[in-house]
Amino acid sequence: MKRFAALVCLFPLVLGLGSPPARAGEVDEDAMDFAMHDAVYTTFHEVGHMFVSEFELPVLGKEEDAADALAAVQLLGPDADEDWGNALISAADGWYFSAVKSTGNGVEELSYYDDHALDIERAYAMVCMMVGADSDWFSEVAEAYEMDTDRQEACAGVYEQAATSWASLLEPYLADGEKGETVTVVYDDTEDYAMFRDALESRGIFEDVARRIETAYLLPRPITIRVAECDEANAYWSAEDAEITYCYELSQSMYDMYINDIPE
């Protein structure tokens, strides 16, 4: 799989004061790419939650960690899109700089009780998965994160374990040419985040995920991926509604992070 690694630069954070919602005509293309890459990763993470729920899969440990691993396996697999490696890099970078920002405010800002691992742990875990899957392409990323050679070599086993575990759990639900239930993408109207709606729709991010999932697996019921305003920067799976929701505010948040919090 061909990947173009946009390597992180580990320098002290230059914190901004935040920015208003981006408007059409004022687009920072690098920031938009960063936000869109994160949207790819985030959607596959929520697909992990959907698989656990819809297929009634066992989870040993935190479900959030399992969903992170599923996203990595999907994005690093042999039939992955050539740009999906960059989605993982952006996700790791986002967690890294979020952690640096939080740590700068003191350890009391860290949510030790959260369902998710700490952002810094998620960042390094994701880099380990990347270099474990393809040491040639991702060694520079691991080196930028100052991951030593022994750990990089050990990451091959970490990735293989995750890939094998998920493949084993999902094997009974593979479509193998059969037609299962469909995944529908719905974009809610928005004025404040119209630029992000246009970018998400034009890139076909959710449509690509939907097509991949509905053709590869026999889903027990129709699934919706809804893109909406949520009054928070978030994404989540609802088993009750059989719906993955991606919030426009999350694109805005990642866009702002790139501009304000990530060093040039």
Image (tube, rainbow, N blue to C red):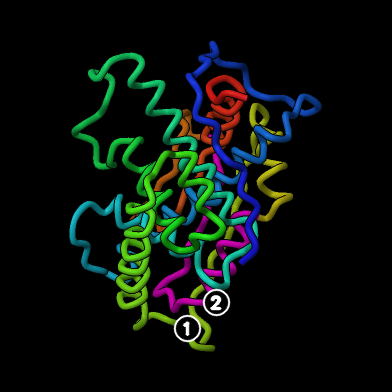
Q: Residue 54's image quarter?
A: bottom left
- Looking at the picture, does residue 59 appear above or below residue 26? below
Taking the view exactly as shown, the residue that stands out farthest to the top is 17
Taking the view exactly as shown, the residue that stands out farthest to the right is 25
Q: Is residue 221 magenta?
A: yes
Q: Residue at x 53, y 29 (%)?
A: 253
Q: Residue at x 57, y 19 (%)?
A: 260
Q: Is residue 38 magenta?
A: no
Range of magenta residues: 205-229
Taking the view exactly as shown, the residue that stands out farthest to the bottom is 177
- Looking at the picture, does residue 165 appear above or below residue 137? below
Q: Quadrant of the C terminus?
A: top right
The percent position of residue 245, horizontal first and vertical second, equals 47, 47
- Looking at the picture, does residue 4 appear above or below residue 247? below
The percent position of residue 183, horizontal first and vertical second, equals 53, 66
Q: Is residue 15 visible?
A: yes
At label 2, which amino acid type do we have?
A: Thr
Q: Secondary structure at mark 1?
A: loop
At label 1, which amino acid type do we have?
A: Ala
Would you name the residue on which mark 2 appears? 215
Tell me whether circle 2 and circle 1 mark residues in contact (CB < 8 Å).
yes
Q: Is residue 237 visible?
A: no
Q: Residues within 10 Å of mark 1 (few under 14, many from 20)?
A: some
- Compare marks 2 and 1 and give the one earlier in the sequence: 1
Taking the view exactly as shown, the residue that stands out farthest to the front is 149
The percent position of residue 215, horizontal first and vertical second, equals 55, 77
Q: Secondary structure at mark 2?
A: helix
Q: CA distance from mark 2 to mark 1?
A: 7 Å
Would you name the residue on which mark 1 appears? 175
